[in-house]
Image (spheres, rainbow, N blue to C red):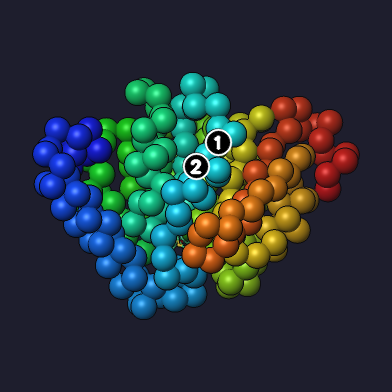
Amino acid sequence: MQSNDLAQLPLRQRIKARAERLFGAWGVFFKGFLKHPVMVGSIVPSSDRTIRKMLAPVPWKDVQLFVEYGPGVGTFCRPVLDKLPRNATYIAIDTNPDFIRYLRKTIPDSRFVAVHGSAADVEDIIASHGFAHADFVLSGLPLSTLPGTVADEIAQATHRALRPGGAFLIYQFNTFTTQLLRPYFERIDRGYELLNVLPCHLFWGWKAQDESAAEHGNR
Ligand SMILES: C[S@@+](CC[C@H](N)C(=O)[O-])C[C@H]1O[C@@H](n2cnc3c(N)ncnc32)[C@H](O)[C@@H]1O
């Protein structure tokens, strides 16, 4: 059921449908955490305040392709779809097949594509959907606990995948992200949200409009 459909229901049914949706999603998320604790990295989905703050700097009317890494049970998906232009595309990539199945079942929106795969393969994934670049990439990945060099490979691949002037949006429980983004992104803006389990750090890594100028200062 879509948010718009919910609004048509009487109050009691609306509350019941919202509760079922919330606890259904939390149940799937918690099961995912029990199965793959390191890859999921959290026991509770992000709060509404985190979502609002994280997405606030996105100029939605300019977005043609929005990509999300680690959507889990889709906590960000509906808020993103509510803002995304009608003709835009939203690709959500997760390594957990249970989450991808859940997203495909619960988000019937023609702009939304749930892909079972790794964020490290973002360039191939967007190319296979007909895109050369993404405008914005959002990440809920537990970057500091990913194995080996995976986090750095993801930062590099994301930088290549973004259009000039686009941004990599990241929410994390620690500040490891700054050192990860610094070699590749021209400007890193930071924020913090206390009302989240756990309180989290927010990062916006902006890709330079003119990469050749930024390369001298950045690498
Ligand atoms: C903390 S959870 C994200 C929660 C969700 N986005 C939210 O806001 O509540 C991390 C997610 O990253 C996924 N994940 C871990 N490694 C990944 C990778 N290399 N590529 C894509 N997804 C990955 C996990 O399966 C999990 O769904």
Residue in the image at 34% along x and 71% along y: 30
Answer above or below: position of 7 versus 43: above
Marking on residue 208 = none
In-image side of 192 versus 49 (left or right): right
Residue matched to label 1: 56
Q: Position of residue 51 (x, y in %)?
A: 48, 46
Tell me the quadrant of ligand 1.
bottom left
As drawn, the residue found furthest toward the right would be 216
Residue in the image at 72% along x and 27% along y: 209
In the rendered structure, which amino acid carries the disc numbered 1? Ala
In the rendered structure, which amino acid carries the disc numbered 2? Arg
Query: Disc 2 on helix, strand or loop?
Result: helix
Q: Quadrant of the N terminus?
A: top left
Q: Are marks 2 and 1 in contact (CB under 8 Å)?
A: yes
Residue matched to label 2: 52
Q: Position of residue 37 (x, y in %)?
A: 44, 76
- Residue 95 visible in the current orientation: no
Residue in the image at 57% along x and 62% along y: 199
Q: Position of residue 163 (x, y in %)?
A: 61, 32
- Residue 44 visible in the current orientation: yes
Q: Position of residue 106 (x, y in %)?
A: 22, 49
Sort mark 1 into few (<14), some (14-19) or many (20+) by Cα contacts within 10 Å: few
Please tell me which residue lies in front, 64 or 44: 44
CA distance for labels 2 and 1: 6 Å
Query: Disc 1 on helix, strand or loop?
Result: loop
